[in-house]
Amino acid sequence: MSDTPKRKIMDLIARRNHSEQELRTKLHGRFADEDGGLEAIEEAISHAKKNNWLEEPSTLAHRLADTLHSRNKGIEYINNYLSEKGLPAVESDEALELEKALAVVKNKFDEDFKFSREDKARVGRLLTSRGFDSETVRKVIYEKL
């Protein structure tokens, strides 16, 4: 049996939840060049919506955010990731962000490490690359180290 957009959506959703934008992008790459491909893609997405195969964007965004929080990613990284997937941004929890940033620093440096000015600059670059906002980075460097 040939591969159709509906079958492909079922395969993709069976592996993990996808946003509508992700599905559209993946299907477009596979079926857009075929005759009637764009119409078939739209029909497949509306079929998935009608059958409640697609999770609510806010619910999916919170689930992905929780996964990224557990990987100690900063809120800027998380919201950028969600935006790439076509999902709404999540709110920042200042205490959680500070806790994650400190966990990243403690994982990288010894507990009794004496931070020089250059080391604090390295910490700032590390946290920024992990997607932490400037306020969290500042608090870690100037208040916690």
Image (cartoon, rainbow, N blue to C red):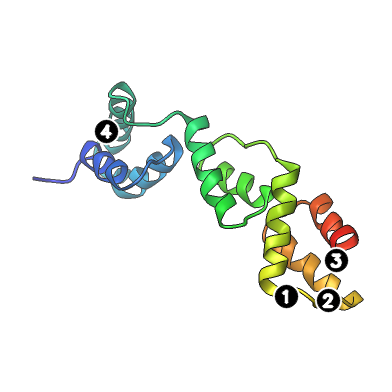
* Number of the front mark, 4 or 2: 2
Element assignment for label 3: loop
Q: Earlier in the sequence, mark 2 or mark 3?
A: 2
Using the image, determine if residue 86 lies above or below residue 29: above
**Which residue bears the numbered disc 4?**
40
> Which residue does the image show at 73% across and 77% down from the upper left?
110
Q: Is residue 88 left or right of residue 113?
A: left
Residue at image coords 72%, 58%: 101
Q: Position of residue 68 (x, y in %)?
A: 55, 51
Q: Is residue 77 left or right of residue 105?
A: left
- Report the residue marked by disc 3: 145
| Residue 119's disc number | 2
Callout 4 amino acid: Ala
- Total number of numbered discs in the rendering: 4
Report the front residue among 119 and 27. Answer: 119
Q: Earlier in the sequence, mark 3 or mark 4?
A: 4
Residues packed near mark 3 inside 10 Å, few (<14), some (14 to 19) or many (20 plus): some
First in residue order: circle 1 vs circle 2:
1
Q: Amino acid at mark 1?
A: Phe
Report whether 2 appears left or right of 11.
left
Q: What amino acid type should be assigned to the residue bearing mark 3?
A: Leu
Q: Which mark is residue 109?
A: 1
How far apart are labels 4 and 2 at the CA level? 55 Å
Cα–Cα span, label 1 and label 2: 10 Å
Sequence-wise first label, 4 or 2: 4
Which amino acid lies under the numbered mark 2 shown in the image of this protein? Asp
Tag 1–tag 2 contact (CB < 8 Å)? yes
Q: Quadrant of residue 90?
A: top right
Which is more N-terminal, label 1 or label 3?
1
